Amino acid sequence: MTVGFLLRTGPYTSQNVDTCYQLASRFLARGHEVRMFLYEDGVFNLDKEIQSPQERNLAEMMAELAQKGAKIKACGTCAKFRGLKRTDIIEGTKLAGMVVFSNYVKECDRFLSFGF
C-alpha cells in the first residue's frame, strides 16, 4: 500500500509533524511506501538548520524518514516565498511543484492531510 501525507503546518507549532512522523515510521516499518508533500509553512520542517537541543529535532526526524525510503518533497513556491532555498533543506528531500503533489495523490491508496 502507498500512503501519502500533506503537511501544511510549521515546526513546533502543532502536533501535526509529530503525528506524520509517527504514522510514516510505522507504515515504512510494515513495508508500505510513503509519500509526503510539505506545503505552506510545512516547508520549514525540512530546514536543515533547525536547532533544538532541548526538544526533538524535527529536521533529523524528517531526514530519518527520507533515509528509510519515504519520498519527501516540499512546494518550491512556498519555500521561495519564505526565503528557503534548495541548499537549505535536508538531504534526501527536494523542492517540487503542484504537479508532483497531484501525482502523489493519484499514486496513493490512502492520503492524509494535516493542516490548520
Image: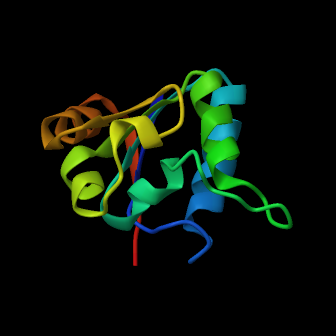
Residue at 58% across / 60% down in the picture? 17
Q: How is the image coloured?
A: rainbow
Q: Position of residue 97 (x, y in %)?
A: 17, 40
User: In the rendering, at what x and y percent does residue 78 appear?
Assistant: 25, 57
- Can residue 91 be seen in this snapshot? yes
**Of 8 and 48, the residue lying toward us:** 48
Q: As rendered, which of 86 and 116 lies closer to the eye?
A: 86
Image coords of residue 5 (percent x, y): 43, 48
Residue toward you, 86 or 25? 86
Residue 113 visible in rendering:
no
The image shows residue 31, relative to residue 63, as above or below, that is above
Reply above or below: 65 against 13. above
Q: With 60 as the anchor, is 100 left or right in this view?
A: left
Q: Is residue 39 left or right of residue 20?
A: left
Q: Residue furthest right?
A: 54
- Residue at the (29%, 28%) spot, across then down: 107
Q: Place residue 106 in its image quadrant.
A: top left
Where does residue 101 sit, x and y in percent of width and height? 23, 41
Q: Residue at x 64, y 20 (%)?
A: 31
